[in-house]
């Protein structure tokens, strides 16, 4: 797949500003991404649509790797409304969590959502840029960068370098694959009235007439591994939600009864190369080389 990048620095900054504005405008993003957060953010007991399955399968991977590392702290890059940061704080009561996002609007929503819970000041949220992280080398034992964050960054190689610089033990990153279902990032597909794609820029309008412009560059599993190879030892690379979104989309079904079957299918196929790039998300788990004083 031929990669289209924004090479000019000023053009890069402009398209990133437009992406940030799209997420700033996304007032209902928490509801769109996580549903009834007060009831379902930690339970993972509802199986009403594809996104429930997506979150469950992603969380299973995150939770297992964090439990193995037993970190003191975790950095959530591109934290959005803070749902993954809060889930980690909830399930790992000894861990401090820092969430950062390029969008001030998303950080405001994360701070608002955090007020619903008591984590003894173990969670903090700040505005920051993934290509220039305001942290020391090896400051965090574990970092996560989930779903479409790297897809939105034209200079993604610099972001990977920065992420691995501040991580001492383990990073978990997932991206949107090249053949996954279409996404409108901050809005449900049903709310979109028109859309167009120009290179790696997606423009769309919602039912309220709000206009959005988002940079979006999908990755293949090979490109993702190549991006991380210079800065880390790759532990695992797999597809998340390889088949289920095609079955869930627009269909009436008993999601709870279907989940065990999809879960087994994922385990059997998620690491086979012919299938990975057709997943909704591609996840890579890696250990930074800078922990041994190399790679930077």
Image (cartoon, rainbow, N blue to C red):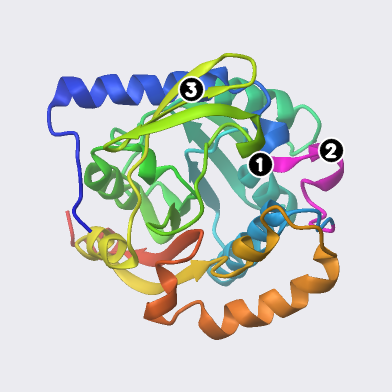
Which x, y percent locates residue 129? 36, 30
Which x, y percent locates residue 234? 33, 71
- Is the C-beta separation of discs 2 and 3 under 8 Å? no
Residue 83's disc is 1
Which x, y percent locates residue 201? 33, 32
Question: Mark 3 highlights which residue?
Answer: 22
Earlier sequence position, callout 3 versus callout 1: 3
Question: Mark 2 highlights which residue?
Answer: 38
Judging depth in this view, the residue of 244 and 192 nearest the camera is 192
Q: Is residue 182 magenta?
A: no
Left or right: 13 in relation to 31: left
Q: Is residue 119 above or below residue 1?
A: above
Q: Is residue 25 above or below residue 277?
A: above
Earlier sequence position, callout 2 versus callout 3: 3
Left or right: 136 in relation to 281: left
Q: Residue furthest front?
A: 194
- Name the residue located 44 percent from the left edge and 53 percent from the top edge: 176
- CA distance for labels 3 and 1: 19 Å
Does residue 121 appear in this view? no
Judging depth in this view, the residue of 84 and 21 nearest the camera is 21
Q: Secondary structure at mark 1?
A: helix
Left or right: 9 in relation to 154: left
What's the magenta region?
Answer: 33-45
């Amino acid at each position: 797949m031929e990669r289209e990048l924004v090479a000019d620095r000023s053009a890069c900054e402009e398209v990133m500003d437009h992406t940030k504005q799209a997420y700033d405008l996304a007032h209902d993003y928490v509801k769109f991404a996580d549903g009834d957060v007060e009831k379902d953010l930690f339970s993972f007991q509802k199986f009403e649509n594809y996104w429930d399955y997506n979150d469950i399968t992603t969380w299973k991977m995150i939770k297992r790797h964090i439990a193995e590392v037993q970190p003191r702290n975790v950095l959530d890059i591109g934290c959005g409304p803070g749902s993954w940061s809060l889930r980690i704080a909830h399930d790992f009561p000894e861990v401090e969590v820092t969430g950062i996002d390029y969008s001030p609007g998303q950080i405001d929503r994360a701070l608002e959502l955090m007020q619903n819970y008591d984590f003894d000041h173990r969670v903090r949220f700040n505005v920051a840029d993934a290509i220039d992280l305001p942290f020391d080398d090896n400051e965090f034992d574990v970092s996560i960068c989930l779903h479409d964050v790297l897809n939105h960054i034209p200079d993604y190689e610099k972001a990977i370098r920065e992420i691995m610089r501040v991580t001492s033990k383990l990073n978990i990153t997932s991206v949107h694959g090249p053949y996954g279902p279409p996404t409108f990032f901050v809005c449900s597909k049903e709310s979109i009235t028109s859309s167009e794609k120009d290179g790696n820029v997606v423009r769309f309008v919602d039912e309220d007439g709000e206009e959005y412009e988002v940079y979006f560059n999908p990755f293949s599993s090979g490109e993702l591994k190549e991006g991380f190879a210079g800065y880390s030892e790759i532990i695992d690379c797999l597809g998340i939600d390889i088949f289920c979104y095609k079955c869930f989309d627009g269909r009436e079904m008993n999601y709870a009864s279907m989940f065990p079957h999809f879960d087994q299918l994922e385990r059997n196929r998620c690491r086979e190369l012919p299938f990975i790039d057709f997943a909704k998300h591609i996840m890579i788990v890696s250990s930074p080389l800078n922990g041994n004083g190399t790679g930077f």
